[in-house]
């Protein structure tokens, strides 16, 4: 009897813990183009919204998270959902954007259009969502970091976020340092876009402030492009925080290794945002 009681007790505890976790990370899903676009590629565009943890008062800041995946697929768990949970714990309304990708034939400007749709949704529904539209950040990883950089460079202020974080981003589309698979999926052979979409060549004073992080041992996306962009950000006087670390690799999301200086980047990003708001 004691054994069965222990089993039942443990099962109930697990169910309660699971329920608490679900409550803590309530997720709403929405198709962004529903009712307007009927093509299959548009139907896949979706946002996953994570509400800020209980205890947050007043209007919350918000963050749009852009997973990487060479513009071909999306690493949506490690560079999407895990990241959203970490920001929700810190009082942010976090949305993960599943944008169109090369696997389904998408190319530029499809991904940028999906981002614009996402930030417009946040601004149009700010009251219902309880967010402060002056505090919308964009965080992107790898190819998603490139898309975040495009967001930072938006010429129309209504699409430009307040802050951007670019983690181990694709920056340049020029040889020899471009990430060729991202370039292939984004451009589909249109070489006339190389300069326009090489972020380091388009840095402007009025772009969104940028937090830029890259590890020198990254085996997927070389750090050279990020070094070039860091130089341009500083030369043009763009508010920025730049971090280069010797170890860390690629694709870690918010789970950088203990021996990497990249560990804890999300807290440093938010601390930096706080200095800009003073």
Image (tube, rainbow, N blue to C red):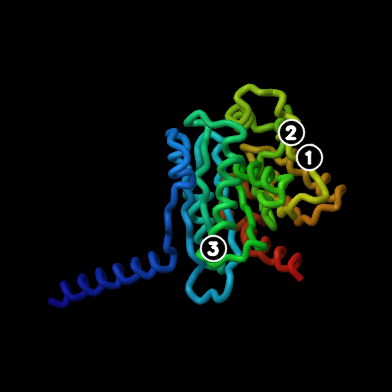
- Residue 273 figure quarter: bottom right
Give the SS element for disc 2. Answer: loop
Residue at image mark 3? 93
Q: Secondary structure at mark 3?
A: strand
N-terminal label among 3 and 1: 3
Cα–Cα gap, marks 3 and 1: 30 Å
Q: Earlier in the sequence, mark 2 or mark 1?
A: 2
**Residue visible at 54% across and 39% down?**
69
Does 199 appear above or below 210? above
Q: Is residue 257 visible?
A: no
Q: Please report contact status of discs 2 and 1: CB closer than 8 Å, yes or no.
A: yes
Q: Is residue 219 above or below residue 6?
A: above
Task: State whether residue 37 is above or below residue 272.
Answer: above
Q: Is residue 10 above or below residue 220?
A: below
Q: Which residue is mark 1?
A: 202
Mark 3 neighbour density, 10 Å: few (under 14) some (14–19) many (20 or more): many
Q: Which residue in the rendered view is the most extreme toward the right?
A: 235
Q: How many numbered callouts?
A: 3
* Front residue of this view, candidates 195 and 38: 38
**Viewer can see residue 194:** yes
Which residue of the protein is positioned furthest toward the front in this rendering? 36
At a point 54% along the width and 67% down the height, the residue shown is 130
């Amino acid at each position: 009897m004691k054994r069965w009681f222990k089993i039942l007790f443990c099962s109930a505890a697990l169910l309660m813990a699971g329920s608490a976790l679900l409550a803590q990370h309530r997720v709403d899903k929405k198709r962004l183009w529903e009712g307007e676009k009927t093509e299959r590629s548009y139907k896949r565009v979706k946002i996953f919204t994570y509400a800020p943890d209980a205890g947050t008062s007043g209007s919350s800041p918000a963050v749009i998270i852009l997973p990487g995946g060479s513009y071909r697929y999306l690493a949506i768990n490690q560079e999407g959902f895990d990241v959203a949970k970490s920001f929700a714990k810190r009082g942010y309304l976090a949305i993960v954007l599943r944008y169109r990708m090369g696997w389904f034939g998408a190319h530029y400007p499809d991904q940028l259009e999906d981002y614009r749709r996402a930030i417009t949704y946040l601004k149009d529904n700010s009251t219902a969502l309880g967010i402060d539209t002056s505090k919308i950040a964009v965080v992107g990883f790898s190819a998603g970091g490139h898309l975040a950089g495009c967001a930072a460079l938006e010429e129309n202020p209504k699409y430009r976020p307040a802050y951007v974080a670019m983690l181990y981003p694709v920056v340049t589309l020029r040889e020899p340092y471009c990430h060729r698979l991202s370039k292939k999926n984004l451009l589909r052979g249109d070489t006339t876009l190389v300069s326009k979409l090489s972020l380091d060549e388009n840095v402007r004073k009025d772009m969104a402030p940028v937090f830029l992080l890259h590890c020198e041992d990254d085996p997927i996306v070389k750090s050279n492009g990020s070094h070039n962009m860091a130089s341009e950000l500083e030369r043009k006087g763009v508010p920025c925080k730049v971090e280069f670390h010797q170890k860390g690799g690629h694709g870690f999301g918010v789970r950088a290794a203990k021996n990497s200086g990249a560990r804890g980047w999300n807290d440093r990003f938010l601390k930096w945002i706080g200095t800009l708001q003073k």
